[in-house]
Image (cartoon, rainbow, N blue to C red):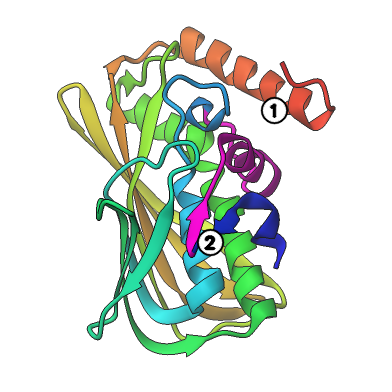
């Protein structure tokens, strides 16, 4: 499985190093959010990597809800626990839950279809920061702190009417932001399709902290710096 390079399994636990997590974020998801840099003081494992590991191990159910309850640090020993009600927890050996998954309906375990779904979703999800966020922040007249951006995964879910590997696509359908003082909740709804066939719908919620008044010039500089980081990494000139 293509995910094997991004975790280590030892003594029945899964461990994700900061370096593995950072490579997944950049190489698979195209996600250059600074909190996924291996040397970041606020480093955390991408939620999309946890999402991917759940699907790789348990398949894609017709209906799934993912609730992110904590930030996973470097090398935390993770376990997967399931119950009869279709609830799956990703937790550490002390019982702290980092991700809770609710699932129902038929399950597709075809490795080709599952990998295609993972790759398409995380590629879509990786565009959230800052690209999908910019028009929302401009509309609401707020922005994150460009010196210490903090955009965190809260939850995501989807419903499918089928799944196939060929021509699978996901695209943004609607985006909203609810500002609450210095924080905001941003909801990104998306369509799932394969060619002309409509396969389902999904939604992702992000939490944005440290809001300040919108500054177009400063945000454009941030995006330019962000883009340069991305280009440097892909050119093998990461700094």
Mark 2: which secondary structure? Answer: helix
Foreground of the two, 17 or 216: 17
| Magenta-colored stretch includes residue 221 | no
Foreground of the two, 70 or 156: 70
Q: Which residues are magenta?
A: 12-33
> In which image quadrant can residue 209 be found?
top left
> In which image quadrant can residue 236 be found?
top right
Please provide percent x and percent y for residue 99.
Answer: 33, 56
Name, please, the residue furthest toward the left: 181
Query: Which is in the foreground here, disc 2 or disc 1?
Result: 2
Q: Which mark is residue 230?
A: 1
| Magenta-colored stretch includes residue 28 | yes
Please provide percent x and percent y for residue 77.
Answer: 43, 50
Q: Are marks 2 and 1 in contact (CB under 8 Å)?
A: no
Circle 2 residues within 10 Å: few <14, some 14–19, many ≥20: many
Nearer-N-terminus badge (2/1): 2
Location of residue 66 with respect to 184 vertically, above or below: below
The residue at 35%/15% (across/down) is 214
Mark 1: which secondary structure? Answer: helix
Please provide percent x and percent y for residue 189.
Answer: 39, 57
Distance from Cα at disc 2 to Cα at disc 1: 22 Å
The residue at 52%/63% (across/down) is 53
Quarter of the picture holding the N terminus: bottom right
| Number of numbered callouts drawn | 2
Q: Which mark is residue 52?
A: 2
Q: Is residue 123 left or right of residue 90?
A: right
The residue at 56%/82% (across/down) is 163
Location of residue 1 with respect to 19 vertically, above or below: below
Please provide percent x and percent y for residue 153.
Answer: 37, 44
Circle 1 residues within 10 Å: few <14, some 14–19, many ≥20: some
> In which image quadrant can residue 127 be found?
top right
């Amino acid at each position: 499985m293509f995910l094997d390079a991004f975790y280590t399994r030892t003594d029945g636990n899964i461990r994700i190093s900061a370096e593995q997590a950072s490579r997944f974020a950049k190489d698979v998801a195209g996600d250059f959010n600074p909190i996924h840099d291996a040397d970041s003081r606020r480093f955390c494992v991408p939620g999309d990597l946890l999402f991917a590991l759940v699907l790789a191990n348990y398949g894609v159910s017709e209906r799934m809800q993912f609730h992110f309850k904590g930030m996973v640090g470097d090398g935390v020993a993770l376990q997967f626990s399931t119950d009869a009600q279709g609830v799956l927890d990703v937790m550490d050996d002390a019982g702290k839950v980092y991700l809770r998954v609710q699932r129902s309906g038929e399950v597709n375990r075809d490795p080709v279809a599952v990998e295609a779904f993972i790759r398409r979703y995380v590629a879509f999800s990786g565009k959230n920061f800052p690209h999908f966020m910019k028009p929302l922040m401009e509309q609401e007249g707020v922005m994150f702190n460009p010196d210490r951006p903090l955009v965190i995964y809260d939850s995501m879910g989807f419903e499918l009417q089928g799944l196939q590997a060929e021509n699978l696509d996901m695209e943004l359908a609607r985006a909203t932001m609810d500002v609450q003082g210095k924080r905001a909740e941003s909801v990104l709804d998306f369509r799932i399709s394969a060619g002309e066939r409509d396969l389902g719908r999904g939604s992702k919620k992000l939490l944005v902290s440290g809001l300040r008044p919108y500054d177009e010039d400063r945000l454009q500089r941030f995006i330019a710096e962000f883009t340069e980081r991305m280009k440097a990494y892909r050119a093998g000139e990461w700094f």
